[in-house]
Amino acid sequence: MSNSPAISFSEAVHLFLQDCKLRNLTETTYEFYKFGLRTLEQFMDENTLEFARLTPFDLSNRYMNYLLDRKLASATIRGRISTCQVFFKYLWQEGYLENNIAADLKLIKAANRAIFTFSQEQIATILQQPDTTTFTGLRDHTMMLVLLETGIRVMELTNMKVEGIDFQSGTIRIPSGKGRKPRVVPIQRTCLNQLNRYLRERGEQPFNDCWITLNNTPLRLAAVKRIMIEHCKAAHIEGTRGSAHTFRHTMAKTYLLNGGDAFSLMHILGHTNIEMTQRYVDLFSQDLHEQHQKASPIEAILSDKSEDSEVEA
């Protein structure tokens, strides 16, 4: 076969992942590609297909059906397919393949996933769970306030640096958000005061990571996720997902309901385009309509005049 690669699948994966590291991709993206290629390997093993003999049909038909038969979510399938696209394009561009056999591979349309948010009552209950008389309780409470105030991602929260908090301007610098794009997000007085209180308890450390353990070591991503889940469980949250990402969705919804605009929210959340932020607006349109009904200037003005007219009559 003229398109046969001169290297094995394992060698191709090794070279591709090595290139990902050289391009300084995030650890999340690296693991995403690595896991996606593991699925491709399972597909080849289960169907006794040789890497050297893979064809465009194997990817566009057989692999696609393999993913669909496993009843994976559409977003997951898109991720596996996009991994194939990037992987085979790399092999072709580097000369390991004469043709890009994934060139015509199409992504399926991803179904809109539900966006879970906390109610005001749930937020109040969750915030009551940490014992703020202890260091860990104060830390956990502060982390949750920052999530609710800024809507930053849990990875961004984990990577927060003390030097990134500007008490004078009331901002937090996110040095490397999704796509490694830095940004600055605003925070208000209550959250600033809470951060100041926490940092006094944190004390001086030989590193700049904001969140620490009782052993004075930086708190890691898995621990932060677990902390949020445990406090949500303790609050007996029902009807929504008790996770760190739900704080982000809750911030977006509350921001819009309180009169914030989509363009500023796009910057705060670190979205790359307004379409991503617009999804919040679309999903919360009923809530926004009810909010507008309560705050409508015309309703307030004309209803008052109408009531006056009725009294005069």
Image (cartoon, rainbow, N blue to C red):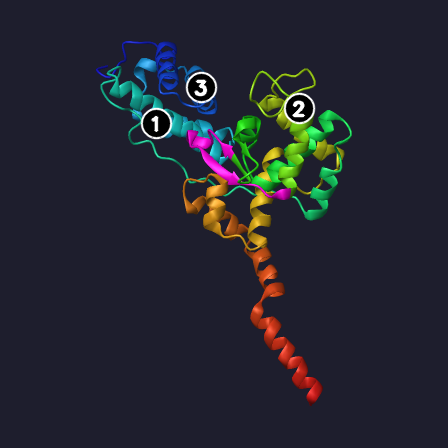
* Mark 1 secondary-structure assignment: helix
The disc at residue 202 is 2
Of the numbered discs 1 and 3, the one sitting upstream in the chain is 3
Q: Amino acid at mark 2?
A: Arg
User: Residue at position x 59%, y 21% from top?
Assistant: 220
Q: Which residues are magenta?
A: 173-189
Sort mark 1 into few (<14), some (14-19) or many (20+) by Cα contacts within 10 Å. Answer: many
Q: Are marks 1 and 3 in contact (CB under 8 Å)?
A: no
Q: Amino acid at mark 3?
A: Lys
Q: For the N terminus, give its image quadrant.
A: top left
Q: Is residue 181 magenta?
A: yes
Q: Nearer the viewer, residue 176 or 102?
A: 176
Q: For the C terminus, give its image quadrant.
A: bottom right
Q: Is residue 116 left or right of residue 1?
A: right
Q: Which residue is mark 3?
A: 34
Where is residue 279 shown, x and y percent of the image?
A: 49, 48
Q: Amino acid at mark 1?
A: Gln
The disc at residue 54 is none
Sort mark 3 into few (<14), some (14-19) or many (20+) by Cα contacts within 10 Å. Answer: some
Where is residue 228 shown, x and y percent of the image?
A: 66, 31
Q: Which residue is mark 1?
A: 85
Sort mark 2 into few (<14), some (14-19) or many (20+) by Cα contacts within 10 Å. Answer: some
